[in-house]
Image (cartoon, grey):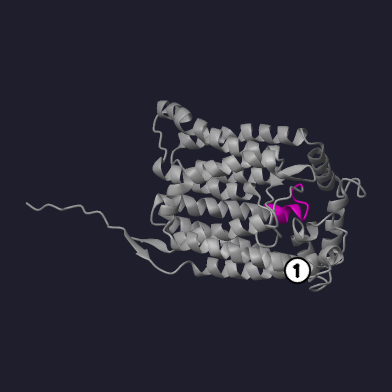
Amino acid sequence: MSSKRKTKRKVNHSYHSPDKIVLVFLIAMAIFGSIMIYDASVYMANAVFNNQFRFLISQIVWIFFGGVIGSIFYFVDYRKILKISVPFLAFMIFLLVLVLVAGVEMNGSKRWFQVGPLPQIQPAEFAKLAIVMYFASWFSKNEYSHSKLEDSKKAFTKAIVPFLFILGTVALLILIEPDLGTAMIICITAFLMFFLSGKDKFHRKGSLTIIPLALLLGVIAIVIEPYRIERIKTYFNLILNGEVADPRGTGYQMQQILIGIGSGGLIGKGFGQSRQRFGYLVENTAFTDSTFAVLLEEMGLLGGTAIIIAWVVFLWRGFKIALCASDKQGQYLATGITIWLSSQAFLNMAANVGLVPLTGIPLPFLTYGGSSTIVTIIAFALLLNVSRYTKDA
């Protein structure tokens, strides 16, 4: 009598060099982004500071600090880093409350801390990282599977309610600042992470019940701020009628963006030849929210397409890192970071060509800003950290 023994294939975890494509993407975008920020900011830097390199120098300093902090997040095992996710999120919530009381007010918004001569800090940017880390840790410990309807009902109180409470607290504090764009990115990222944390139909159907609530809150956030209503009107007029309403008023920014893109054509005017950066784009948006529009004007459709393709490649590599991660924590962490950065990039680029309303969402690396740059580099460092551990069956 013979018997066959069933053996499980052992999964080996190997430590190796990080994902080279993501690493090259990080370095290339940091360099290219700095060049574009310099190009788009020359007029404002000369006009205000009489120094054309003013914003470029600041951006390089922030990249340096992001690299220093990011090196810690890269070399320390990400599983150890996730152990501080709860106090990190609690600290970010504290700062989001504090900034509403003691923050610097600019253009009717309280989003930044100013301590002496130090650069301004925007807690909402770091809240993105805190949310991803917290939910990566939570979902890896509680992977939801509900074979019966009764299990799904229990999960509603044990999973959906706590999830909505934590996410709602962070999103509401950011909306009060007000900062709809950041709140939207956090909600999109968190929802997709939650949706992927369960493997059965009950969990996914339950997850979808969050969408109507999120849409309702989004409508309320738009209605309570008149300028958001005007942006929505401008957007729908552009989509439905093919023209910008009130081009000298609420539609001015979109009108100038489209003029720049149209004049760029297929190959663009050439580097440094943008006219819209010379004060036509309102305030300092030429090198912040609308840098992609300046890029399209100077490098045309071909240059813009190259940037989009680069982000598509990043999206592919990010999800591949998640699929090959050695454990659930790595999978959820890589997934969250990839969704967060990709959705932010694509929404910014879509807004700059009129596909979605203008929201002020930064484009990673091509948007000037200290907090955004630092936290983006830290996120990439964590993603590269996860990519050093693979699962070989």
Is 356 a magenta residue? yes
Residues rendered magenta in the picture: 347-357
Asked whether the viewer can see residue 300, the reply is no
Which corner quadrant holds the C terminus?
A: bottom left
Q: In screen coordinates, is 255 left or right of 317?
A: right
Q: Amino acid at mark 1?
A: Tyr
Q: In screen coordinates, is 289 left or right of 234?
A: left
Asked whether the viewer can see residue 58, the reply is yes
Q: In screen coordinates, is 75 left or right of 43?
A: left
Residue placed under numbered mark 1 in the picture: 38
The answer to which of 54 and 209 lies nearer the viewer is 54
* Residue at 59% in and 35% down: 169
* Residue at 57% in and 52% down: 339
The answer to which of 17 and 350 lies nearer the viewer is 17
- Tell me which corner region of the image, top left, top right, bottom left or bottom right, holds residue 375: bottom right
SS label for mark 1: helix
Position of residue 336 measured from the top left corner of the image (x, y, whole percent): 53, 50
Is 283 a magenta residue? no
* Residue at 93% in and 49% down: 248
* Residue at 87% in and 66% down: 275
